[in-house]
Image: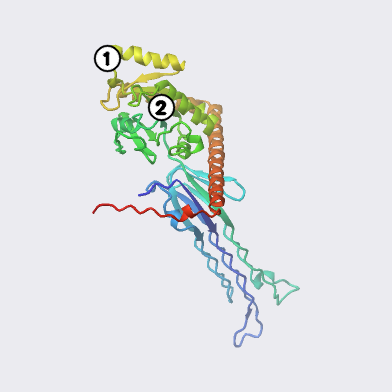
Amino acid sequence: MKFVDEATIIVEAGKGGHGCLSFRREKYVPKGGPDGGDGGDGGSVYLEADSALNTLIDYRFQRKFKAQGGEPGAGRNCSGSKGEDLVLPVPVGTTVVDMDTHEVLGDLTREGERLKVAQGGFHGLGNTRFKSSVNRAPRQTTKGSEGEARNLRLELKVLADVGLLGMPNAGKSTFIRAVSAARPKVADYPFTTLVPNLGVVSVQAHQSFVIADIPGLIEGAAEGAGLGIRFLKHLVRTRLLLHLVDVAPYDGSSPAGSVRAIASELEKFSETLAGRDRWLVLNKVDMVAEEDRDAHCQAIVDELGWNGPVFRISALSGEGTKPLTQAVMRWIEERAELEAQNPEVAEQERARRAQMDEEARARIEADREARRADRKNDDDDDDDFDDDDYDVEVVYAPE
């Protein structure tokens, strides 16, 4: 199934039913009176988090959704039936943004959580409601109100405790395969990972955390190079970043230079995300001779001036992965305990995540605008007549 992490939809709540103008008329009943009933309320539109979904692809094909309207009132004081609410399932981790006001309406992070995104119209009143001692035969009614309509943008961000960061072919997918049951595609060429992958790492009984593997970055990703930076938004919910680096790259590039390049792209995307706790994980140490391994790894750390935690692993053989996952589990538990004991720390974390969301949204929108401008310039250039524009190259493939 194709992974779609953004979609725009139009939702419209149902219209309220009109009130009824009616008078009681029965045989052998000399005195009637008003008996017009009220209309029914229009149905509202809700979004509901569903853990069975992991993509927004359904909302790429159908973009308009409307709830049922309320029925009008009837005589004999019969009220119209209420319109049925419309419930749209979305993946857990979906953020809902009003495209007209840019307001974040809600964040669906728990299974079964519901968010009302469009209020149904209210019912109209029948003429019975206006009966009084001085108005025995009222002819007043009210109409049902229109349902609320909204243009929404759905943004899916995976829910994970730990995020993997690094260049393509740094071994992120191999690492997640080594420590979890996830089986992302791995190969010996860059950009094997094209969509985010999640894995549950079980350290021991009743101790586990979720790790997210996103497509690798390259230098210039913020300007659209490679796969760009749009997948970085999936890291804003994580608590800890593991920066994997290949200590023996096949192209002879500098491992320290790779780390600095990724850090630079991260800062361009979101300064707040770049300030997250980040651990350096030196991967593929089995590719360096054992007698030179310590000196080689220490040279990378010294060149970076790295002061944070450093781990040496081989994701392919599993060497060093267990101590790393145990350290991550301890860090997560300590952080969760600190937030539980100190509400101020928990509030700071919520504010930090909101800031990262805002920065990520602004950066991605700026990237979209730049791409639109480039396409417009290309279209303008195509307006210039050129005979070469009509040349067609035909390549015959062998059968």
Viewer can see residue 306: no
Q: Residues within 10 Å of mark 1 (few under 14, many from 20)?
A: few
Q: Residue at x 58, y 75 (%)?
A: 74
Q: Residue at x 49, y 31 (%)?
A: 265
Q: Quadrant of residue 212?
A: top left
Q: Residues within 10 Å of mark 2 (few under 14, many from 20)?
A: many
Q: Amino acid at mark 2?
A: Leu
Pick the front one: 224 or 243:
224
Q: Quadrant of the C terminus?
A: bottom left
Element under label 2? strand
Pick the front one: 260 or 341:
260
Q: Is residue 23 above or below residue 233?
A: below
Q: Which residue is mark 1?
A: 290
Q: Please, which residue is most extreme toward the left here?
A: 399
Q: Residue at x 25, y 25 (%)?
A: 317
Q: Which residue is mark 2?
A: 242
Q: Is residue 107 above or below residue 11?
A: above
Q: Earlier in the sequence, mark 2 or mark 1?
A: 2
Pick the front one: 28 or 399:
399
Pick the front one: 40 or 183:
183
Residue 151: image x %, image y %?
A: 56, 54
